[in-house]
Amino acid sequence: MTTQTRILMISGLLLAVTGCSPAVRQGPPAPIIGPGGAGTGMSGGAAPAPSGNVTVTPLKAPEITTVEQTPVKTYQRSDTPPPAQEPVPAARPAASSGASAPPASDRETVALATPSPPMSKAVKTLLQQAELQRTSGDLTGAAATLERALRIEPENGYVWNRLAHIRAEQGNAGLAGELAAKSDSFAGGDQNLKRDNAKLIAQSRK
Amino acid sequence: MPAGRSSRQTRRRPVRRPRGDRFRPVKLLLVLVLLAGAAALGLYAVYLSDIITVKFEGKRWAVPARVYGRPLELYAGAPIRSEQLVGELEQLGYRRQEKAGEPATWSSSGSRYQLSTRPFQFWDAAEPSRLIEVTVGKGGIEQLRDPRTGAEVALFRLEAPIIGSIYPSHNEDRVLLQRQEIPKVLIDALLAVEDRHYLSHWGLDPLALARAALANLQAGRVVQGGSTLTQQLVKNFFLTEERTVTRKVNEALMAMVLEARYSKDEILEAYANEIYLGQDGERAIHGFGLASLFYFNRPLREVDLPQAALLAGMIRGPSLYDPRRHPERAKNRRDLVLDMMQEEGFITAEEATRAKAASLGVAPRGTGTAASYPAFLDLVRRQLRRDYREEDLTSVGLRIYTTLDPRIQRTAQRTLAARLERIEKERKLPPETLEGAVVVASPQGGEVLAVVGGREPRYQGFNRALDAVRPIGSLVKPAVYLTALAMPQRYSLVTPVEDAPISLKVPGGRWSPENYDKQSHGTVTLQTALAESYNLATVRVGLDVGVDRVAATLRALGVERAIDVVPSLLLGSVSLSPLEVAQVYQPLAASGFRTPLRAIREVLDDDARPLQRYPLTVQRAADAGPVYLLDTAMQAVVQSGTARGLNASVPASVGVAGKTGTTDGLRDSWFAGFTGDMVAVAWVGRDDNKPTGLSGASGALRVWGDLMKDLAPGPLRLVAPDTVQVEWVGCDTPTKVPFIAGHAPSPGQGCQAGGASTEGWPQVQRQSPASGPASTQDDPISRFFKNLLR
C-alpha cells in the first residue's frame, strides 16, 4: 500500500518536526473558533450526516397535506420528462393563441374563438405556455404556469377554467368542479365560459 | 531511518568495544523502543487516516434547506412603483451603476430602468441572466423590453430572494461552495493573511510556526498564529477545543495525512465551507458562501477585492472584526490584509490604495439573508415537518420556494412595532407590555404573504401569529350573520332585529350578555347590528338561526379546532390564532371559496430538481350570494361602523371590508379585514392575558390601518353574483341594498306610514326605481315592515 508507506514516511518526518516545533500555543486558539459556547464551531464535524447519496422523498408518498389538512396531490415526476420544446404540429397554430382543441373529446376547451375577457399580455403569454405544456403531457407544469397567471390576475375566470381542465385531465374531477365553480364566479356575462364550467361541474358530480 | 541509525552504531562497535559491551543491552532496548515507537506512530497514522477518510469523503456538512421568498413578477400593468422596484433590487443586492452590465447590476434614467439579472433556477425553468428594460409610470410598470433587440417582453420574474434557512439544532448555517466557485481574489487574500506557503507546504509550516513563536515570546502574549490552513481545518473538523500537547501532535499528524491524501484544492474547498465567520443570533455563520450573503448580501462570486480582504481578515476573530458592530476595527483589519496581499505580490500598490478607499460594503441588517423572518419560517417549518424528516430539512440542501412577500413582511413588522410603541406612550402604559401579531394572505390564492409573531420580529421565541390562541370576540359575528343571510326567506341586510337585553339559562347559571356600551339600541337592521357590533342583537339572531348552524358555518369557513357549541360562541368564546382567523376570513374575501392557506409553493432538491408542489386548491365554503351580502355589510363596518377610524389611514375608494373584535375585560384587540388583494388579521394583547384597555378599534384596527396605508392595497370590487338583486330601500334617503334574488321585499311598502325614520332603524323601502310596481300588499315581509312602523 503506497499510502501506508507514505504515512510511515510522514510519521518519521513528524518525529523530527515535533522535536523542533514550539510548545503548545497558549492563549486564544487558532483562528477558526466557534461562536460563544465552546465547541460550537466544531459541531460541523461532530454531526456529520450519513455519507453516500441521500435521496429525499416526502414522507407521505401519495398524498401530502397542506397547512389546512386538505389532501393535495404530490408532485410526481413522470418517468420521461416531457420535452418542453416538443414540436407542435404545424396544423395547430391555436397553441400560440392560447388554446388548442386537441382531438380527444375530454380535452374539449373553451374555444378562444369566443372573445375572451380583456387580459394582460403577461397572462396571455402564460396561457400559451400552459397550453404547450398541456399538449406535451406536462400537466403538472401546466398547472404551475396557470397558478402563476392567477397570481397576476386572480380574478380571471378564464384562467381558473383552464386550471379546472388540467385537474380534470389529471383525473381529479372533484377539484376540477370546484375550480370551475370558482371560474364561474368571475365569468360575468361570458356564456361560453359558463357553459364550459357547467360541464366540468356536472362531470365532477358523476 | 531508525534502521540507518542502528547500522551506524554497529559499525562503531569494534572501536569502543571494551566500554560498549556494558551499554549494549541498553542500546538495543533503545533501538527497539524507537522502532516500536515508529511502528506505533505509523499504525496510529493509518488509524487517523481512516478517520479522515470517513469524514472527508463522506458528506461533510449538513447543508440546511434554503428558503426563498416569492419572486417579483414584472409585466406591463404590474402595480409596481419605482421605489418598490428599487427596493426589491436593493434587497437582492443589485448594484447601481452608470450602465447595467454584469449580472446583479442596474441603472436608471428617469422612469426607465435597465436591469442585468442574476440567473436563477425556478421550479419550472432555469431563468438565465438577461438584460431587461423596465419603464415605470405612476400607476406601475408601463413597459418591459429587451434593450438589445427592442422587442417587448411580456413578463419576467426577478430571482427569488433568500429569506432564511432551516438549519440543524446545532445552529450551523452554511451555503455550500465548490472549489471553482471560490473567487481567486478571496483565495489570494486568504493565503496572504493565513498561510503564505499553503501551496508549497505539506501540512505544517515550521517557518511560520517559529516566526509566530518568536513573535509571541517577544510580545509576551499570542499575537500571531502559525497554524496552516490545513491545521486549522483539521482542528475544526476532527478535534476538540482542548489545548493539550496530545491534541497539538494529533493536529500536526492529521494535517500531514490530509495533505498526503488530498489535493490542495480539496482541502481549500473544505476550509472555505467549514470556517466560522460570525454570529446571527443563535445562528452560526459558516463558510465564505453564507458569510458573503450575510455581510454583503451578494453571492460570493460577486465580491470585490476589499470585500474579499475583509472576509479573509475576519477569520482571526469574527466577532472582534464584525464589520457591523466594529466598523473601524474591521476596516483596519481589512487594510492590513490588503497590505499583506500587496507584499505577496497578489495586488499592486495602486489596487491596494483603491481598495482601501472603498467602504466596507456591508449590507444593513434587515436585507438579504441578514434579515430574518422567524415567524414566517416557523410556519414554513411546521408545514414541511408534516412531509419531510427533520434531518432531510436540515442536511440535504433542499430549496424551499415560499409565498412570502418581503415588502409586505417588512412593512408589517415595522408598522406593528411602531404602533404598539405609540399606543403605549399615548395611553401611558408601561413600555413593552403590549404584544401583537399580524398575518397577511392573498384572498383568491390563499398564499401567506407575511407573518409577524410579535413586536420584536427577529426574536425567535413565542410566535403569536401561530400560537397565541385567544378568544376571537366579535370577529365571530360575520359567521353568525352569514348563517342568517343564508336563510333569505328569514333574513336580509335590512331585516329588523331586536337589540334588547336577553338572559339565558346555561349550565351552571344564567348568561346575560351586554353590549360594549352597556346600552340597548332597540330595533335595528341586521346590517347596523353588524356594523355597530351589537352583542344583544347578534345573540338573538344567532339563537334564532341556531348555535349549531353558526358552528357549522365556522367549520366550513376553515376552523379545525373543536368548537364548543354554547350560546357564548355567538360572541366569540371560541379561541383561535391569528393565522386561523385569517383562514376563516379568506373565504369571505373570495366569494365563499375556501383555499387552504399555504406558505410553500414548491420544494426542490439540492440539484434543483423538482420534488414537490403544494398546489392551489379551492372548495366552496359558503354560497356566493350570502357572502356578497355579508361583504357589503362588512364594508359598512368600515364606512360607518366600529371600524370607521380606518378611513383616516385607508382611502374610502379601497372599500375595505372587515370586523373589529374585543374580548372580555379588553384583553384581546382584533381586526380582520380584506381589500382586493389582501386579507389581513391583526391582534393586540398581552402575553400574560391581562387587560390592555384597548378595544378592537383602538388597538388592532390602528395596526391594520398603518399597514395598509403603507402598502397601498388594491381596491375591493365586489361583484354581485347572479343570485343577488339590488333594490332601492329607504324613504327619505333611499339606498341600494342587495338581496338574494327572489327574496327582496316588495317595493313601495313601508313608507305609507308617513316615511318617518325611527331611531336606529331608518331603512324602510319605498318605490324601487329598479323594479316594477307593487304586486301585492299582503306578502309577509311587507306586513312585517308595516307592523314595525306602527
Image: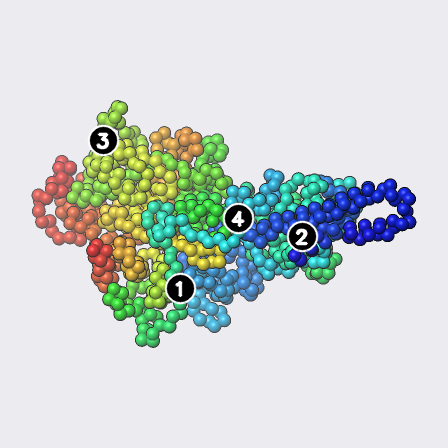
Q: Which residue is mark 3?
A: B500
Residue at left offset 23%, top offset 42%: B483
Circle 2: residue type: Val
Please identify the quarter of the rendering in which residue B339 is found: bottom right
Residue at left offset 65%, top offset 46%: B235
Q: Earlier in the sequence, mark 2 or mark 3?
A: 2
- Front position in the image: B755 or B87: B87
Q: Earlier in the sequence, mark 4 or mark 1?
A: 4
Mark 1 — on which chain does it sit? A
Q: Which residue is mark 2?
A: B257
Give the Cα separation between the discs numbered 4 and 1.
31 Å
Circle 4: residue type: Ala
Residue at left offset 78%, top offset 40%: B220
Which of pointers 3 and 4 indicates the residue nearer the eye?
4
* x and y percentages locating residue B257 in the rendered image: 67, 52
Give the Cα separation between the discs numbered 2 and 1.
45 Å
Tell if the residue under mark 2 belongs to the same chain as the one under mark 3.
yes
Q: Which residue is mark 4?
A: A49
Task: Report if residue B332 is visible in the image.
Answer: no
- Front position in the image: A65 or B120: A65
Position of residue B495 in the picture relative to residue B4 (left or right): left
